[in-house]
């Protein structure tokens, strides 16, 4: 299982490990985020999901504090599946990844540059829907 996780992480073209707590900063493409089997979590606020759109396979789950975030995340976790966090520019995910990594036994990937980096590379985000967890869609 660990070998699968490591090969999966290699697919994300690491920039560098951020900490020893299994947090990695990576610049995956939108295609990689859609195809590689990670739990992709968009931690932005609901209005941001509506304004800029989301990746179609993203779980929409705002990050306000580690305890409530982990409680909401728990039902979605799969054994051995890395968790990738995305926000608008990457600032919030860097903080969130460091805070939740000690609670997880899988790697946490901080998607550097966020949705704005993907959009700058030509990605057209999708309109969020309630099935993803959008509360105002």
Image: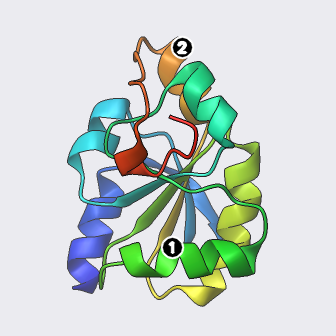
Above or below: residue 44 compared with residue 123: below
Q: Quadrant of residue 91?
A: top right
Above or below: residue 44 compared with residue 76: above
* Horizontal and vertical percent position of residue 103: 60, 88
* Horizontal and vertical percent position of residue 26: 51, 48
* Horizontal and vertical percent position of residue 57: 32, 45
Task: Classify residue 74 as left or right of residue 112.
Answer: left
* Horizontal and vertical percent position of residue 34: 27, 41
Of residues 123 and 7, the one drawn nearer to the viewer in this rendering = 123
Tag shown at residue 81: none
Q: Secondary structure at mark 2?
A: helix
Q: Secondary structure at mark 1?
A: helix
Q: Quadrant of residue 65?
A: bottom right
Q: How is the image coloured?
A: rainbow
Of residues 52 and 99, the one drawn nearer to the viewer in this rendering = 52
- Local packing at callout 1 (Cα closer than 10 Å; few below 14, some 14-19, many 20+) is some
Looking at the figure, which quarter contains the N terminus? Answer: bottom left
In space, the residues marked 2 and 1 are separated at their CA atoms by 29 Å
Task: Tell me the residue at 46%/15% (across/down).
Answer: 121
Tag shown at residue 73: 1
The mark closer to the camera, 2 or 1, is: 1
Above or below: residue 102 compared with residue 118: below
Task: Tell me the residue at 23%/79% (across/down).
Answer: 3
Task: Tell me the residue at 28%/84% (across/down).
Answer: 2
Task: Classify residue 85 as left or right of residue 1.
Answer: right
Task: Tell me the residue at 64%/71% (across/down).
Answer: 69
Is residue 118 among what the camera can see?
yes
- Local packing at callout 2 (Cα closer than 10 Å; few below 14, some 14-19, many 20+) is few
Above or below: residue 21 compared with residue 33: below
Query: In this figure, which residue is indicated by the disc labeled 2?
Result: 120
């Amino acid at each position: 299982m660990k070998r699968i996780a490591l090969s999966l992480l290699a697919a994300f073209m690491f920039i560098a490990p951020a900490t020893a707590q299994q947090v990695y900063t990576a610049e995956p493409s939108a295609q990689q985020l859609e195809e590689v089997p990670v739990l992709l979590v968009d931690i932005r606020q609901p209005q941001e999901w509506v304004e800029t759109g989301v990746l179609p396979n993203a779980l929409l789950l705002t990050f306000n504090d580690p305890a409530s975030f982990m409680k909401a995340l728990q039902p979605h976790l799969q054994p051995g599946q890395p968790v990738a966090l995305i926000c608008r520019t990457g600032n919030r995910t860097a903080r969130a990844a460091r805070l939740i990594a000690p609670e997880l036994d899988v790697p946490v990937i901080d998607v550097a540059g966020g949705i704005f980096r993907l959009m700058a590379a030509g990605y057209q985000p999708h309109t969020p829907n309630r099935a993803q967890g959008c509360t105002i869609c």
